[in-house]
Amino acid sequence: MTALQKKLIEANLTVGYVAKRSGVKVSTLHFYETKGLIRSWRNNGNQRRYKPDVLRRIAVIKAAQAMGITLEEVKQTLSTLPDERTPTKKDWSALSKQWQTQLDERIAFMQRLRERVDGCIGCGCLSMDKCPIYNKDDHLGENQSGAVLLEKDT
Amino acid sequence: MTALQKKLIEANLTVGYVAKRSGVKVSTLHFYETKGLIRSWRNNGNQRRYKPDVLRRIAVIKAAQAMGITLEEVKQTLSTLPDERTPTKKDWSALSKQWQTQLDERIAFMQRLRERVDGCIGCGCLSMDKCPIYNKDDHLGENQSGAVLLEKDT
DNA sequence: TATTGACCTTAAGTTAACTTGAGGTTTTAA
DNA sequence: TTAAAACCTCAAGTTAACTTAAGGTCAATA
């Protein structure tokens, strides 16, 4: 039995091991911890130890980031996971539902944008007043900034 | 004839007017200029003056940003516009084509991600080794970082 | 004409999401 | 047992994309 297997069985993952498995740097794990995204406890020598589900948490964090979700939002969502026990399938499912909606919206937004890139930027209507790109009502969540492309003067 | 109309007819837009029309701050226009995204010339009193097509450029910059394109990339793409003459419908069309492809890729990426959020995060397969989220080959352009969700240990 | 609002420049500050470095301790393995 | 590898903390640096501030000039209007 290698030391690595031992670690896994004992479910006391070291920061180096977690870093390697998850593909993030050790410094990132420290950083996530200060941000409250992951947790660890310390051994006698003050070194961090992790439960295996930290790997899933990190995968989720990265997936969320790839969707354009900020760490702050991820933190909010992750906070709905149970604190005491290891999250179950159901827990993770609930989590994914929250993001599916966001992702759907984001995809829809991109698709509308795509149509506009097609229809508006390429249309040659140099009069900005008639341009559909002006449409102010297209937005993507509350804290999203990219949607108002141009405002008319009031 | 108001002063504003005069400005428009003479096609010498002031920074304040452009800011108002485009919905960006004056400081942002300065910033874009230092980044080489827009251009201006100066009047006698050293104040910036813009050609009307700067408004379209800004609209394009904002649309691109909403697609997740960086200013650096926007600059690259904008540099394909003619320098001497005012860009035509065709010029803008060519531009939009470049981004359509990117946008299509991005949308496809998001959709794959959505499927995974559904199929993987929610699947309860706590063994990360079997999880499709490991798929390393899913990427989104060269300088995109979010795609490799987890790497296996080598 | 005078004064207020619009501009100018340069430098520094801001936020997110990390990374790097310095200086020191703990583990691990030969 | 001892040296290398892995950890630790805390502070500061990094990049993108801007914003804010300070101190001064120019232009529009009552």
Image: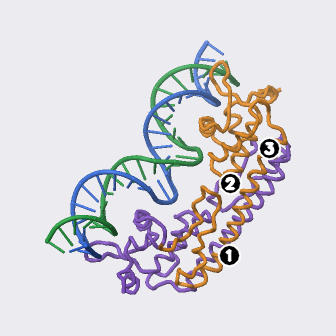
Chain colours: A orange, B purple, C green, D blue
Q: Chain of mark 1?
A: A
Q: How many marks?
A: 3
Nearer the N terminus, badge 2 or badge 1?
Answer: 2
Residue visible at 78% across and 28% down in the picture: A11
Q: CA distance from mark 1 to mark 3?
A: 34 Å
SS class, disc 1? helix
Where residue B66 sits, quadrant-wise, is: bottom right
**What secondary structure is marked by label 3?**
helix
* Depth order, front residue of D10/D2: D10
Q: Amino acid at mark 1?
A: Glu
The residue nearer to you, when weighing B123 against A131, is: A131
For discs 2 and 1, the disc positioned in front in the rendered view:
1
Q: Are marks 2 and 1 in contact (CB under 8 Å)?
A: no
Q: What percent of the width, then of the height, locates residue B122?
A: 83, 47
Q: Which mark is residue A115?
A: 1
Name the residue beneath numbered marker 2. A66
Q: Report the residue at 50% width, 72% height from top.
A: B58
Tell whether label 3 touches label 2 (CB within 8 Å).
no
The residue that label 3 is drawn on is: A92
Amino acid type assigned to the residue bearing label 2 in the image? Ala
Circle 2 residues within 10 Å: few <14, some 14–19, many ≥20: many
* Quarter of the figure with the C terminus of chain B: top right
Q: Within the image, what quadrant is residue A18 found in?
A: top right
Q: Residue at x 69, y 28 (%)?
A: A49
Rendered position, B26 above or below A124 = above
| 1 or 3: tag closer to the N-terminus | 3
* Rendering coords of residue D7 (x, y %): 62, 29
